[in-house]
């Protein structure tokens, strides 16, 4: 595939950010998390603020769209060597699974999932034109994965049900794994201390 040559611009204002996701306080209702976990029967007897849930889930969905397209940009750049490319495609698949779960949950809550933008818009927002090496692609992916890790960790304290908190923790674990693998591929050392994520 050809290298992405789209001119860089600042992040698109409409793109949800990890900062705005964390700024919501992660206050998803138990209903939303139960649906996200695929526990429809459990969700049936619960109550929650569906409008707020849809809004929070749509921010998370926007982040998953961004991650999917970031990996697509990396894969299409021609900069990734074969073993790294395979891992990038695998991680993109994880994000697609997250996306599908979020879309299904938003729809079950009666909401409308936020639409994915065009690849060119993500290229501009992520400054894909500045990617000149495999290291540049990995650095971008690692930064996005770290942001996603912290965003998902931010929702856990708001959840009163242990099973529901487990869903958010599993999402955060996927993102943490991605960040750790990418960081290692870049030859960077492990975080120096304990409690490195979610602060």
Image (tube, rainbow, N blue to C red):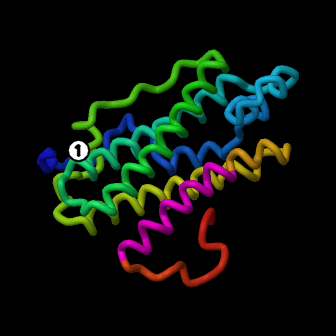
130 horizontally vs 95: left or right: left
Q: Quadrant of the N terminus?
A: top left
Residue found 63% across the figure and 26% down from its top: 105
Q: Is residue 74 magenta?
A: no
Q: Is residue 171 magenta?
A: yes
Based on the displayed image, in which of its 4 quarters is residue 141 positioned? bottom left
Residue 100: % across, % down: 53, 31
Q: Nearer the viewer, residue 90 or 155?
A: 90
Q: Quadrant of the C terminus?
A: bottom right
Q: Which residues are magenta?
A: 169-186
Residue 119: % across, % down: 26, 36
Residue 149, visible in the rendered structure: yes
Residue found 46% across the figure and 45% down from its top: 17
- According to the picture, the residue beneath numbered tag 1 turns out to be 124
Residue 132: % across, % down: 16, 63
Furthest residue toward top: 110
């Amino acid at each position: 595939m050809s290298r992405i040559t789209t001119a860089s611009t600042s992040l698109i204002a409409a793109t949800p950010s990890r900062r705005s996701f964390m700024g919501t306080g992660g206050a998803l209702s138990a209903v939303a998390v139960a649906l996200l976990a695929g526990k429809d029967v459990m969700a049936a007897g619960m109550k929650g603020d569906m409008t707020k849930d849809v809004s929070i889930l749509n921010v998370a969905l926007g982040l998953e769209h961004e991650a999917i397209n970031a990996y697509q940009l990396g894969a299409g750049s021609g900069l990734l060597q074969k073993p790294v490319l395979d891992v990038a495609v695998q991680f993109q698949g994880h994000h697609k699974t997250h996306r599908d779960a979020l879309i299904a949950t938003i729809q079950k809550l009666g909401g409308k999932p936020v639409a994915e933008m065009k690849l060119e818009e993500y290229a501009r927002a992520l400054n894909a034109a500045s990617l000149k090496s495999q290291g540049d692609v990995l650095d971008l992916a690692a930064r996005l994965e770290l942001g996603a890790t912290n965003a998902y960790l931010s929702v856990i304290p708001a959840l009163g049900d242990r099973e529901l908190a487990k869903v958010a923790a599993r999402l955060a674990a996927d993102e943490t794994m991605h960040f750790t693998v990418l960081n290692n591929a870049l030859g960077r050392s492990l975080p120096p201390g304990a409690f490195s994520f979610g602060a």
